[in-house]
Image (spheres, rainbow, N blue to C red):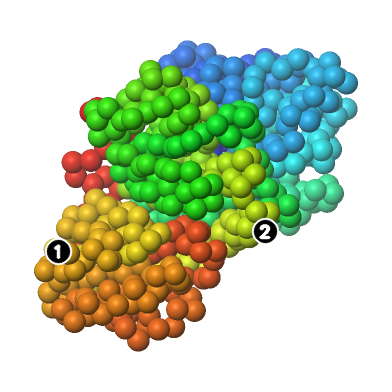
Amino acid sequence: MCGIVGYTGNKSAKDVLIEGLKKLEYRGYDSAGVALEDNGKLEICKAAGSVGDLEKTLNGKFNTAGLGLGHTRWATHGRPTDENAHPHYSASREIVVVHNGIIENHQALRDRLSIEGGYEFRSETDTEVLAHLIEEYYRGDLFEALRRALLDVEGSYALVAASSREPEKLVCARKDSPLIIGYGDGENLIASDIPALLTHTRKTCILEDGELAVLTADRVVVYNRQGDILEKDTLEIDWDLEAAEKGGYDHFMLKEIMEQPVAVRETLRQRISAGEGKVSLSELEFSVDELKRVEKIFIVACGTAYHAGLVGKAVIEKLVGIPVEVEVASEFRYREPLLEQNHLVIVISQSGETADTLAGLRLARSRGLNVMAITNVVGSTVSREADHVLYTWAGPEIAVASTKAYLTQLIALYLFAIYLGESRGVLPVEEAMGLVKGLQSLPGKLNSVLNEENVARLKTYCDHLAKWESAFFVGRNLDSPVAMEGSLKLKEISYIHAEACAAGELKHGPLALIVDGIPVIALVTQEAVLDKALSNIQEINARGGEVFAIAQEGFDDVQNQVDSVFYLPPVHNLLTPVLSVVPTQLIAYYAALARGSAVDKPRNLAKSVTVE
Ligand code: M6R
């Protein structure tokens, strides 16, 4: 995710862009840049760092520019460096481009442009190919050049371009990444999100996939891919600024929960081939020999990332047949683990900056081991120090409670398990195909879990749950780590004491705490242990506990045994955690809301724990 703003009009474009980019920093903040029209030239100013840093660099410069485009970056292709920051120039420096999304065929285009066109690339980004491609097709009409260039492009984009030869004009296009036009009086704007527009206008128009637009100060024209002019409806925005920054949601956490179908789709993008049942993770740069030599895996992480690791352990052991240990990073680093040369250490960290996880990584490397990182932040310390990196593409996660990052960590682990199994020749094709198809179906299924009716039901349940000071999460097999994650989320933001328990363990102690009416959330998605899970539920019922089950559709017996059941769409047995965790996130969210907690910034906690 990145943030884009474009402006043309009678104000200082620089000021409008900087103000707009600051409003979009939630979309990415590792580097920022602007291109401003200055005496017939397009001048770029960009660097790694925040929009605030960029503002300082621009101080006193380009004050009279009336047209410009800006970008705040969340690195995908290419590290967060000055060169990789947007905007990007074409070879002649006459065209500038900012882009949000992923150009999937960028390598092929890069090869073509450099071999046939002699273009030299200045950055590692996929975006730079767009600048050169548009230039290649430029014959005096920027809109036509963009339209033609996009015929060659595969992937997702929200992009804005300008040319010094048509200095009154911004051209834009959208596919799978948002772009919103803001209509002003003698000025027009374009941005990735509404907050960047609100100071200037509330009259907007959402560009749809496949649409392009040309903005001048006094006119906006929207086109389809064929170049036909479209009539577009305007949308009057009545949100206040704060609501707009959260996409209209009350909290970042809810917004991020709702973004999960897209985050999962992005993390799967270009890594699976459903027809063949294949996973390709060439970005990891493991040789097949290296993968074959792995005798044991340690997964090292903290908090939610640790819970993702627990699911990863079950999946890797099942699909690959090698032992996996999951370690809380703060313990791993001090317990002198028995590490050997053919062991692989996987660290998982959303931020890539967690001190304990980083220390675990360094310990493993100091013993000469290969370390692979699963992280959400390109250029983070973990990504720089690991030998191999598998990125999750969740986009920036702002709420302290991790939701979409967790889901994408699971996806990364499934992908890696399948990849490892296939590379070692131990995963039968049929099985791989079933899993890959299952992975591909997840965004759609997540959307149905997150439908309005379901959300309303969970909210109603939470009005009851929120009155309690204690709650339980139980589950067996793959439901057990999800119970742990559900309980962490609930305690973290609602401050209800929540205990997770492998359901079979209840009778060894925790059952003593089950009293009349106490809320118990039971995860029931594992067919192999369904009977056992049902008998655990009976144990709870017998002590008066009130059970809310989250169960796989088709497990009809569940509803007869519990007070309430939330059914999940059927999915491959190993993939259930991706769906079952979602209601637990919403339960935590609505319970916290009912108790008036600071949902996005819970007391005593920080998003990134960079101290021991
Ligand atoms: O950035 P990391 O993934 O390394 O963070 C690890 C934990 O601090 C984090 O998952 C924490 O547990 C979350 N706040 C839980 O929602």
Say which residue appears at 58% left-offset and 41% top-offset.
420
Residue 420 marker: none
Name the spot of residue 474 as percent of width and height, x first. Answer: 29, 65
Say which residue appears at 77% left-offset and 48% top-offset.
223
Name the spot of residue 605 as percent of width and height, x first. Answer: 23, 40
Name the spot of residue 18 as percent of width and height, x first. Answer: 48, 28
Q: Distance between the residues labelled 2 and 1?
A: 42 Å
Q: Quadrant of residue 166?
A: top right
Q: Quadrant of the C terminus?
A: top left
Q: Is residue 253 visible?
A: yes
The residue most toward the bottom is 560
Which residue is at the front of the view, 425 or 174? 425
State whether residue 147 is above or below residue 571: above
Say which residue appears at 28% left-offset and 61% top-offset.
502
- Give the residue type at disc 2: Glu
Which residue is at the front of the view, 564 or 334? 334
Q: In what element is the residue under mark 2?
A: helix
Q: To which residue does mark 1 refer? A: 509
Crowdedness of circle 1 by 10 Å Cα count: few (<14), some, many (20+)?
Answer: few
Q: Quadrant of residue 340?
A: top left
- Give the residue type at disc 1: Gly
Mark 2 vs 1, N-terminal side: 2
Q: Can residue 468 be seen in this view?
A: no
State whether residue 523 is above or below residue 306: below
Residue 430 marker: 2
Say which residue appears at 37% left-offset and 41% top-offset.
325
Q: Is mark 2 within 8 Å of ligand 1?
A: no
Which residue is at the front of the view, 521 or 158? 521
